[in-house]
Image: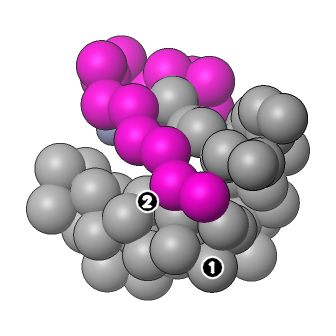
């Protein structure tokens, strides 16, 4: 099974948050929720989305 993981510091944040899920669809909401709560990012820009997508690691 494939799993997807994301670490906040991979997008240059000084933050120890990491999360994983077994699909992109369930991972993205976790990341956006964290961004809102921990980093006060109410709007996720396209640029940030691209950064996040590039930082997501896939494990098989
Ligand atoms: Zn963070």
Residue 19 position by quadrant? top left
Report whether the residue tagged 1 is closer than 8 Å to ligand 1. no
Mark positioned earlier in the residue sequence (1 or 2) = 1
- For the question of whether residue 34 can be seen, the reply is yes
| Residue annotated with mark 2 | 31
Identify which residue, 23 or 54, lies in the foreground.
23
Q: Residue at x 31, y 31 (%)?
A: 17
Determine which residue is flagged by label 1.
Answer: 25
- Observer-nearest residue: 36 or 1? 1
Instruction: Specify whether residue 40 is in view.
Output: no
Q: Quadrant of the C terminus?
A: top right
The reply, left or right, for residue 37 in relation to residue 26 is: left
Q: CA distance from mark 1 to mark 2?
A: 11 Å
Q: Nearer the viewer, residue 18 or 23?
A: 23
| Residue visible at 63% across and 79% down in the picture | 25
Neighbor class of circle 1 (other Cα within 10 Å; few <14, some 14-19, many 20+) is few
């Amino acid at each position: 099974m494939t799993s997807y993981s994301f670490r906040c510091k991979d997008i240059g944040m000084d933050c120890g948050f990491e999360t994983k899920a077994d699909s992109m669809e369930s991972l993205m909401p976790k990341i956006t929720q964290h961004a809102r709560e921990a980093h006060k990012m109410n709007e996720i820009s396209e640029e940030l989305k691209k950064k996040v997508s590039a930082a997501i690691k896939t494990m098989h």
